[in-house]
Image (cartoon, rainbow, N blue to C red):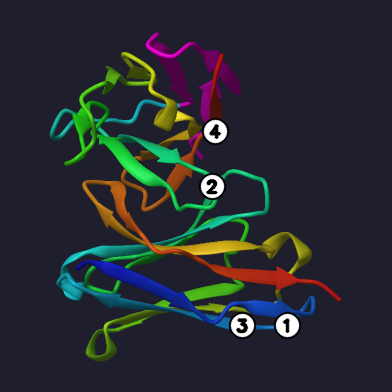
Amino acid sequence: EVQLLESGGGLIQPGGSLRLSCAISGFTFRSDAIIWVRQAPGKGLEWVSFIADSGGVTSYADSVKGRFIISKDNSRNTVYMQMNSLRDEDTALYYCTRGRNMAIDIWGQGTMVTVSS
Amino acid sequence: DIVMTQSPDFLAVSLGERATINCKSSQSVLYNSNNKNYLAWYQQKPGQPPKLLIYWASTRESGVPDRFSGSGSGTDFTLTISSLQAEDVAVYYCQQYYGNLMYTFGQGTKLEIK
């Protein structure tokens, strides 16, 4: 079964850091792009970051560029997102997803990040 | 950056009737090299992650009922539900990708039963 399992969310003060993890199973990890999408409470979907199948190409939304870093560990079948200098507006449910055909075909259940003092 | 604008924001349709949601892109999402439109549609029910319905503007994802269809090209796209069922109540999002390693979602359309 194809599965993406996020972890690492929690309550963090503004300016703090968190590292989200996405454990991947059920498909060839090295053949697909992994994308982080977030959804603030009661709001719509926002694309956050992308890492190519090779791991050598990444991209970020302007809202997180310079603060978030996406990476992958092929040996652990895991993608990470290091989130630094967190702001109130980063509060959201963070989904780890698989990119295919320039769409997103598999979604995890999400991990909640709350930035608050 | 490409901006995706959906209309309407809210839609109420009677059971068995047709529902139509529109999505307009600020730039064309037609990839000339392969003549594909990189436009997808998602359905999100409360408390659940989104579900892919349509990709390449009109290709139905496996397992999606055939009452869901997508159409359009370039900058204007439509998601149609031919005969609304109770289980179709959800928020629907369009999403584009245009070769710059960036994705954009529309703001969402909330579909309810009239």
Residue depicted at 31% across the width and 14% down the height: B82
- CB of mark 1 within 8 Å of CB of mark 2? no
Q: Secondary structure at mark 1?
A: loop
**On the image, numbered disc 2 is attached to which residue?**
A45
Q: Do the residues indicated by labels 1 and 4 lie within the same chain of the protein?
A: no
Query: x%, y% of residue B111?
Result: 52, 25
Q: Secondary structure at mark 4?
A: loop
Chain holding disc 4: B
- CB of mark 1 within 8 Å of CB of mark 3? yes
| Mark 2 surroundings within 10 Å by alpha-carbon count, few (fewer than 14), some (14 through 19), many (20 or more) | many
* Cα–Cα gap, marks 4 and 2: 8 Å
Q: Is residue B8 visible?
A: no
Instruction: Give amino acid for label 4.
Output: Gly
Query: x%, y% of residue A71?
Result: 39, 79
**On the image, numbered disc 4 is attached to which residue?**
B108
Magenta residues (range): B1-26
Q: Secondary structure at mark 3?
A: strand
Instruction: Give amino acid for label 2.
Output: Leu
Residue depicted at 15% across the width and 72% down the height: A28
| In this rendering, the label closer to the viewer, 1 or 4 | 4
**On the image, numbered disc 3 is attached to which residue?**
A18
Q: In this picture, is B6 found above or below B61?
A: above
| Mark 3 surroundings within 10 Å by alpha-carbon count, few (fewer than 14), some (14 through 19), many (20 or more) | some
Going from the N terminus, do you reach mark 3 or mark 2 first? 3
- CB of mark 1 within 8 Å of CB of mark 4? no
